[in-house]
Image: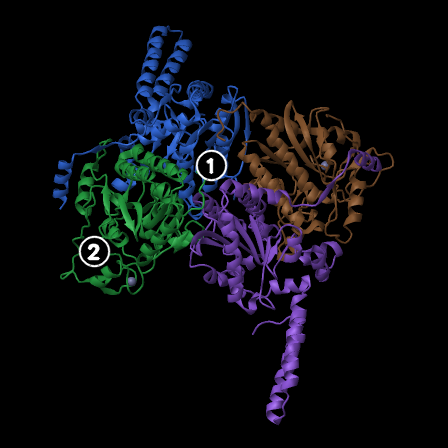
Chain colours: A brown, B green, C purple, D blue
Amino acid sequence: MFKDIFRKTKYVTIPSTSTQKRTPADISPKEPLNISKKELPDGLWVKCPKCGEVLFNKDLEENARVCTACEHHFRISARERLELLVDENSFEEWDNDILTLDPLEFPGYGGKLLEAQEKSGISEGVLTGHAKIEGNPVVLAINEGNFMMGSMGSVVGEKITRAIERAIELRLPVIIISTSGGARMQEGILSLYQMAKTSAALGRLAENHLLYISVLTDPTFGGVTASYASLGDILIAEPNALIGFTGPRVIKQTMRQELPVGAQTAEFNQEHGLIDLIVGRTQMRSVLGRLLRYHQEGAQYGATV
Amino acid sequence: MFKDIFRKTKYVTIPSTSTQKRTPADISPKEPLNISKKELPDGLWVKCPKCGEVLFNKDLEENARVCTACEHHFRISARERLELLVDENSFEEWDNDILTLDPLEFPGYGGKLLEAQEKSGISEGVLTGHAKIEGNPVVLAINEGNFMMGSMGSVVGEKITRAIERAIELRLPVIIISTSGGARMQEGILSLYQMAKTSAALGRLAENHLLYISVLTDPTFGGVTASYASLGDILIAEPNALIGFTGPRVIKQTMRQELPVGAQTAEFNQEHGLIDLIVGRTQMRSVLGRLLRYHQEGAQYGATV
Amino acid sequence: MVQLFDFEKPIVELIQKISELQKFSAEKEIDLSQEIATLEKKVVLLKQEIYGNLEPWQKVQIARHPERPNFYDYAPLLFEDFIELKGDRLFADDRSVVGGIALFRGTAVTVVAQVKGRDTKENIKRNFGMPHPEGYHKALRLMDQAEKFGRPILTFIDTPGAACDLAAEERGQGEAIARCLQAMSCYHVPVISTVIGEGGSGGALALGVGNVVLMLENSFYSVIAPESCASILWKDSAKAKEAAAALQFTAQDLQRLGVVDEIVHEPQGGAHKDTDHTAGQLSLVISKHLTSLMSETPDVLREKRHQKLRSIGVYKEISQKSLDNFEKRLD
Amino acid sequence: MVQLFDFEKPIVELIQKISELQKFSAEKEIDLSQEIATLEKKVVLLKQEIYGNLEPWQKVQIARHPERPNFYDYAPLLFEDFIELKGDRLFADDRSVVGGIALFRGTAVTVVAQVKGRDTKENIKRNFGMPHPEGYHKALRLMDQAEKFGRPILTFIDTPGAACDLAAEERGQGEAIARCLQAMSCYHVPVISTVIGEGGSGGALALGVGNVVLMLENSFYSVIAPESCASILWKDSAKAKEAAAALQFTAQDLQRLGVVDEIVHEPQGGAHKDTDHTAGQLSLVISKHLTSLMSETPDVLREKRHQKLRSIGVYKEISQKSLDNFEKRLD
Ligand SMILES: [Zn+2]
Ligand SMILES: [Zn+2]
């Protein structure tokens, strides 16, 4: 059943934004994750959108796509993340045979789905499966930000729910790595209730005393923040990742409230008591590995089920 | 076993303070509950310390010692409160045979105890027992503010703990009515750990799915706020009662912070989400009766023990 | 005076016309009773036509009607007693969420409801019915207590959405909602959630994880406000009407999609035309479901609620061969 | 340079005298080795006498010594790994309370500790080691997780007391502490609480509900700060020394009173004279108790902790006859 399905992204991805300082307006549901995809002539160089440093693409790859000058974390795909985190050849993908329908026949949804599939190279906004991290078996779900902002419709909700249910069967810990604009409006109420469905599954996981680590990456918002992404026993964020419930643009539009610089960053969230740990991408594997080890079944003194 | 042990207070109690507006400095651990006891020649008249109205003592008694002009709640003794709350002849006192020792041989403690006993007419700072409120059986504990500020030493902690333990045996709800300056320093660490002891007993009560209503009256502070008084399923306060952890005088002395007028009142606490209900003394019996009725054993759909 | 919608104007105009005719008939002593009777029949038909075929956007308008009854209007009609319990025990008492213990047809229940204000002053106090995290923490505290004491839970949903300001972000709006979802899904007591007005997104769903989900006929319950949807999709919030149709968020839509179990009838024109009648309908429907839920064991109740949630979603599972083809296309 | 206390001055003066004699002896080439040897023996005796008979008030001074090792000094010496976890998930991360998951001699444990600052800047950040409600909420969250995952809990107490300001009152300081007390008393995992510096009142007790309570030799643990006690009783906070004696709050007193189970030895003069040694002692004693606790079943552990709490307190039960006499006296 174990199958290596890592895919290489085919393009050098260069976000075109040149914002030097992180302000909350950097993200809104309207903004695609990779703002543009320009291929440099030789594909060798990338300019850091934060510090402006021009980086060897190879150096960037080797540094987990974290700027070697300023530690800016470039957005990466679910499969890139998988490759960075899990033990080689340990990933077994689950439920990639569940495909999205258009139950509301929502204007334009069909086209958007096809486009997202082309762009991301995967069938939906989350990758789920079983893997090992530093030898520790774990059930893993990773949002794909390139797929309609990683938004949650019926399929994302179903795949995450099934992954959690299998973790309960297998008595394994769960790690979910979020990148999402929230619930996917094109599936209406069905998307909204995926929040309840995934949360319910996590409720069962918690009652089974199984560990759930939620890793929040840039950006995580809306119905995903308000469901599975916030329900971790341990919440880890990548540095400077924007995390919140309402996007800054909506706050500005509806409340006429301009968020201060630095609002909704990982650091802001930690200051306000909402995040356990901020972990740089290059350290993530080690920290997850240690946390999994300290929660191994049998390591416990006597969990009270 | 049922025994009517209501006692009438022997004096007309007139607090001498003439503060018109409630400010936090009204209470401190140094301040006795009834600031002075002046007997008016005929004992017929009492002046309201809040609005200054001169009231017929008889009218005041008939109105549960609540000022008929401004609704100021006069401080009352545990036995007066008992009489106001429970069904006639329904009170059975428990554990009045536990007496206080002076384990640290603390300077002046022995004398203070005797004085408090003389003044309050009871042996310690809490009255416990079994009673009925509007026909609903309940275990009741009432702090006696006249006994060393209702402070908690070994005996108060032990009596409250025993009352809770008996409630578990009898499967009865518990109501504790607090008036206290906090832990009693003259018994040192033993007083401090009464906070843990009473909280532990309430933990068992909660695990048994038995109702605990905590009624906070003026004043409730320190180690009592930081233990049994705050652990109610439902927290009820009397109007304008001062409730807090640190007394306003200590805050002023240690932090050089002057509390705003109205701080630490029941209303302030409710505004800050810390109190469920503010109930005037004349309504207390009815509200407690209804709450007890709605929590009767057997009324539940299916509590999950 | 009750505020009128555009779509109601033909009815009002016709009624006005009748009254003019009556006046004319009286003044001029001309018998127009037959004509008037015909017109009055036409009013009935017109009402049936208009109110019976409300478009989604019209329902949104009714659901947001400033005189639409809120929880405080229904409470004294639904309950023999209601003891309001306040506060999250952490930070504040959020007045956009109201809760407590009520007596419903003789059964003690825990009630949690979202409440909008009736005027500007009250709306400021209640933040226009948009709860902050402390509102959800209060809801959670009261519902946890219902679970502890085996008391059924009734929730009433009526919010444009959760508060969307800096304060809400600072205090963890997302987690507050998520905790409600998780907790509600795990309770062993009957939970009935009723949408009585606006059901705005995650902020509404936080009280919506019922064994039974009910909706008043003219309420709506949506993943996103129609204006925001239009603004995101078509960069034009004025296209809210189109968005309202696309989102399929009426009670009838949601029943079809398996989210709503029963629709509670409103008087013609909306609940605000007759609060007593609406409350009576609500009471009947809630009572019927509560009786039925209370006949189940706690474990079964919980499992059924879970299964209900579990089943929401539309997708297809494809064969391995189709999958291979699909993947080839992507490569 | 390490700050000196008055009571240490005779030792320092004697050491200075010896060094003067040595200098004098070297300069003048006079043999004073015998005199110096005698004086050096006297230093040892003087140290034993002074440090071995510290009065309560002197222990308070050592416990509050600005260079007394805090949790962050011990952590790398006690644990093979320590992953700090922050926040209460409600309002803020309180830096006067530090917690996380640590590896202690191969066992994963949850650690919660109070931490004072080492300088003014850090003290402001850590509020002088005085936790606000969010600190206790964080502690509770982390300890609840330890219970969930069956992980032993180690708490380290070092606070002058819970924060005593308006903000603390607004956010429910009393309830926050009470919730810790109740939760800790109900856990099924081993809980070891160690007072490493100041144990200030309810704010300290909130982390003190252990199966085993340990105290460093020169720490103290009191129902009230001696200054406040003196101020209340004798209207004179300068009488703190007398209050310190009356309150009986040293490790030795608390062991006698049944609260403290074992005293952890400090190097002569206090922990700050040798942090490594103190950490080694701490590790040994904690390890011994942890091993012993982990051999019990969860239910037994919980019951024993409960019984320990249950037994704290001194009072007498009198006969009915004595009671009658007592009541007569009061009538
Ligand atoms: Zn850079
Ligand atoms: Zn008055």
Residue B19 lies, with reference to residue B122, above or below; the image says below
Residue behind label 1 places its C-beta within 8 angstroms of ligand 1: no
* Quadrant position of residue D46: top left
The N terminus of chain D lies in quadrant: top left
Total marks in image = 2
* Quadrant position of residue D24: top left
- Neighbours of disc 1 within 10 Å: few (<14), some (14-19), many (20+): many
Secondary element under disc 2, as helix, strand or loop, is loop
Q: Residue furthest right?
A: A41
Q: Position of residue C31 (x, y in %)?
A: 63, 90
Q: What is the number of the mark on residue B13?
A: 2
What amino acid is at disc 1?
Leu
* Quadrant position of residue B267: bottom left
Residue behind label 2 places its C-beta within 8 angstroms of ligand 2: no
Q: What is the number of the mark on residue A136?
A: none
Whether residue D60 is visible to the viewer of this picture, yes or no, is no
Q: What is the number of the mark on residue D140?
A: 1
Q: Mark 2, chain letter?
A: B
Q: Position of residue C58 (x, y in %)?
A: 66, 65
Q: Position of residue C196 (x, y in %)?
A: 56, 59
Residue at 51% across, 25% down: A300
Secondary element under disc 1, as helix, strand or loop, is helix
- Neighbours of disc 2 within 10 Å: few (<14), some (14-19), many (20+): many
Residue at 57% across, 55% down: C214
Whether residue B103 is visible to the viewer of this picture, yes or no, is yes
Q: Is residue A243 left or right of residue A109?
A: left
In this rendering, do the residues under marks 1 and 2 share a single chain? no
Residue at 60% across, 71% down: C3
Residue C288 lies, with reference to residue D318, above or below; the image says below
What amino acid is at disc 2?
Thr
